[in-house]
Image (cartoon, rainbow, N blue to C red):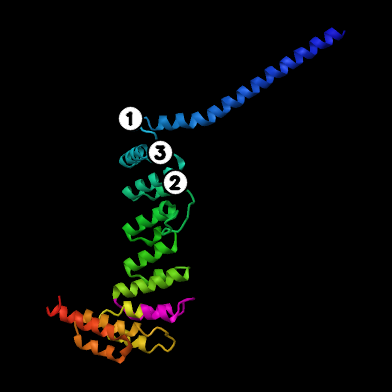
Amino acid sequence: MIRKAFNIWTQFVCMKKIIGGFIILLILLSLGLVYFLPLMKLNQELSEYDLSSCSGNKVNLESGYACYTSLAVKYHEPLICEKLKESRRNLCYQKISWEYNDTEVCDLMGDVLQPSDNKDGGMYSRAACYFYIAERKRDVGLCLDDNCKKKIAIMNQDLSICDTIIYHGDRAGCFRGIAKVSENYSICDRMKDIELVDARSLADCYWKSAGTNIAACVKIGNMSDLDEPSIEPQCYRDVATASGEESMCEKILDFPEYSSVYVECLNFFKRMRGELS
């Protein structure tokens, strides 16, 4: 009786080991399928492309990365980017999208929305990908962040775009940028109602957008809350040199503590006449 029970127990243990081994085998097979099936599918989908020139390169090396990326761009085929390590794919997608102005490829970068001017991560972000194409097309509708909107607004000199910018720094920079490129200092007044814009920033905008208009410098002089007196004489110097009116340099004499700015203004015209090298 005891012997029979022992035999039954032995058979049970053996059967348990066999079943356990079978389960482990199934798990290993499943894991293998999870890994290899997508790879096989990818290779099948890429079979129409000649990737043999990259087969000798390890994709974790710079040569392998450059090789597959080059072919991805050549064939306009983002699937080739999947041959790369995940950390390398975004740059591969970006190169394709920029070559063909293809925002659909930008979307393959996922929901990575670092600011387009973020040099630590945003350089290869979805926002940066869209930014470059938006800049090429001068199309604000492609922008995903305020930095992009600011750039397109300045390019198109479109003040209405500035009004849609949420972040106060970018919105102020938008008005300042348009004022500068259009040499229209009156646009700077749009900055007055923006939070955190101080008198120094406003005066700097008047100065940088003055062009040949001395009225911008006068406006700086009329700012009672400005605690940086050097901006006004520098404005007169730049307007004098931009307009070719040497007599405007005399306005700087009202600021004796900035005599060096007056000398700079005079020397500009002396060099123009060949009196200074």
Labels 3 and 1: the sequence-earlier one: 1
Q: Nearer the viewer, mark 3 or mark 1?
A: 1
Labels 2 and 1: the sequence-earlier one: 1
The span from disc 3 to disc 2 (Cα, nearest Å) is: 10 Å
Quadrant in which the C terminus appears: bottom left
Quadrant in which the N terminus appears: top right
Q: In the orientation shown, which residue stands out farthest toward the bottom? A: 254
Residue labelled with disc 3: 79
* Residue 108 numbered mark, or none: 2
Mark 1, secondary structure of its residue = helix
* Residue 52 numbered mark, or none: 1
Q: Nearer the viewer, residue 109 or 272?
A: 272
The span from disc 2 to disc 1 (Cα, nearest Å) is: 25 Å
Question: Residue drawn at (76%, 15%), measured in percent from left and top?
Answer: 12
Q: Is residue 241 left or right of residue 59?
A: left
Q: Nearer the viewer, mark 2 or mark 1?
A: 1
Q: Nearer the viewer, residue 142 or 145?
A: 145
**On screen, residue 55 above or below 153:** above
